[in-house]
Image (cartoon, rainbow, N blue to C red):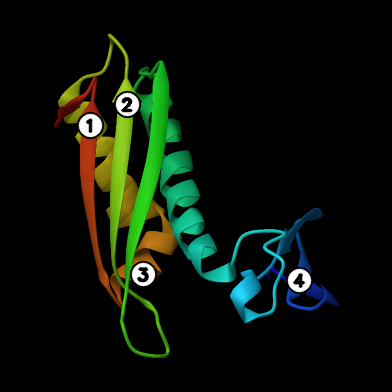
Amino acid sequence: MDTVNVKWNEKMSFTNEVDGHKFVIDAKEDVGGENKGPKPKPLMLSALAGCTAMDVISILRKMRMEPDYFNVKVEGELTEEHPKHYYKMKIIYELKGDNLKVENVKKAVSLSEDRYCCVSHVYKQVMEVTAEIWINGELA
């Protein structure tokens, strides 16, 4: 079982402890925070980006392909009404390198999104999740 601990510091600041690592989350000033750390909601985007990024790199390495550059962005669109929540996310994979085969990169992304990334699996059950793959500056 995974467990996290969130301890209140002051105002709207909290220290999170995850697997022995600590970081602060906070709210913006206009709602009583001091902007000392990220807000909780964008961490949902970070969880998706990190989960699929680790999968894709691991799969590409098994294919004996390692990019010179790899970046994953996740854009989330929020509802207008409360409770404001993400109703759509787009994952943007950016890779650069001379040894990258488009079909292998697409396969690695597909395996992550459809089979291995538990965050993607959960999010897809409640919202639209799409992806783009950019290899050496071109849409794959």
- Label 1, secondary structure: give it: strand
Name the image quarter holding the N terminus: bottom right
- Label 3, secondary structure: give it: helix
Residue 108 drawn at (x, y percent): 29, 37
User: Does the residue at mark 3 contact the one at mark 4 (Cβ under 8 Å)?
Assistant: no
Identify the amino acid type marked 1: Trp
- Label 4, secondary structure: give it: strand
Distance between mark 4 and mark 1 Cα atoms: 37 Å
Residue where numbered disc 3 is placed: 123
Residue 45, label in figure: none
Identify the amino acid type marked 4: Ser
Residue where numbered disc 2 is placed: 95
Residue where numbered disc 1 is placed: 134
> In the figure, is residue 67 to the left or right of 29?
left
Distance between mark 2 and mark 3 Cα atoms: 24 Å
Give neighbour class at mark 1: few <14, some 14-19, many 20+ (Cα, 10 Å). Answer: some
